[in-house]
Image (spheres, rainbow, N blue to C red):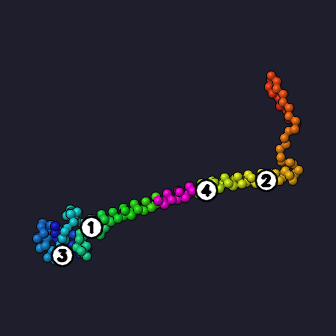
Amino acid sequence: MEIAVYLDDGRNIIGVNNTNNLAAEMQATEKGWTLIQNSDPAFSIDEMFKWTVRESDNKLIHKSTGMTPDEETKTSLVELTKDQLKDSLTKDQLQMALTTLTKEYIEDKANSRMVTTELTNRIAELTIKLDKVMGIDPTPETPTDVTSTATTDGAVITAQ
């Protein structure tokens, strides 16, 4: 539907002719009036103070955004899609970071066990060397004379 709107010097809509297409076309020939073809169904005369006409294409637009309701919807969808993509990238990045940290933890734990084993072996070797330097034979002695006695009260084992 075509309508005609009257704009003041600040491009505020202060008059509307929406009776029919012919009346709108006739009204648009008067000074200060602009013809709006395919007027936006969201436009309301009660809220005409929220609207203006874009000079480049004579479309009704919201003053607050400078866009038609359709453009606002498309922009919102684009932003929502961008946010969702950004969120999914963030989730992927977090998952990758967590995987990396887990791998590092496992490797650190394995390395820690290897280091502990290596340190234990070296301490044992040094202890043996130190004992030899001190004149201590680190090899355990096997007892030469072992006797055992069994009684009704229990067993007694002695080693020499």
Q: Is residue 154 above or below residue 104?
A: above
Residue 123 in the image, given as x and y percentages of width and height:
77, 53
Task: Give the foreground label among 1 and 3.
Answer: 1
Q: CA distance from mark 2 to mark 4?
A: 27 Å
Which residue position is annotated with label 4?
Answer: 107
Residue type of the residue flagged with mark 4: Glu
- Few, some or many residues within 10 Å of mark 1 (<14, 14–19, 20+): many
Residue 109 in the image, given as x and y percentages of width and height:
63, 53
Residue type of the residue flagged with mark 3: Gly
Q: CA distance from mark 3 to mark 4?
A: 78 Å
Secondary structure beneath disc 2? helix
Which residue position is annotated with label 3?
Answer: 32
Which residue position is annotated with label 1?
Answer: 68
Q: Is residue 135 above or below residue 38?
A: above
> What is the quadrant of the N terminus in the image?
bottom left
Which residue position is annotated with label 2?
Answer: 125
Q: Quadrant of residue 155?
A: top right
Whether tag 4 and tag 1 are in contact, CB under 8 A, the answer is no
Write the residue at 29% across / 67% down. Answer: 71
Write the residue at 82% across / 24% down. Answer: 151
Write the residue at 87% across / 51% down. Answer: 134
Mark sitting earlier along the chain (3/2): 3
- Is 22 magenta? The answer is no
Magenta stretch in the rendered image: 92-103
Residue 26 in the image, given as x and y percentages of width and height:
11, 73
> What is the quadrant of the C terminus in the image?
top right
Q: Nearer the viewer, residue 37 or 88?
A: 88
Residue type of the residue flagged with mark 2: Glu
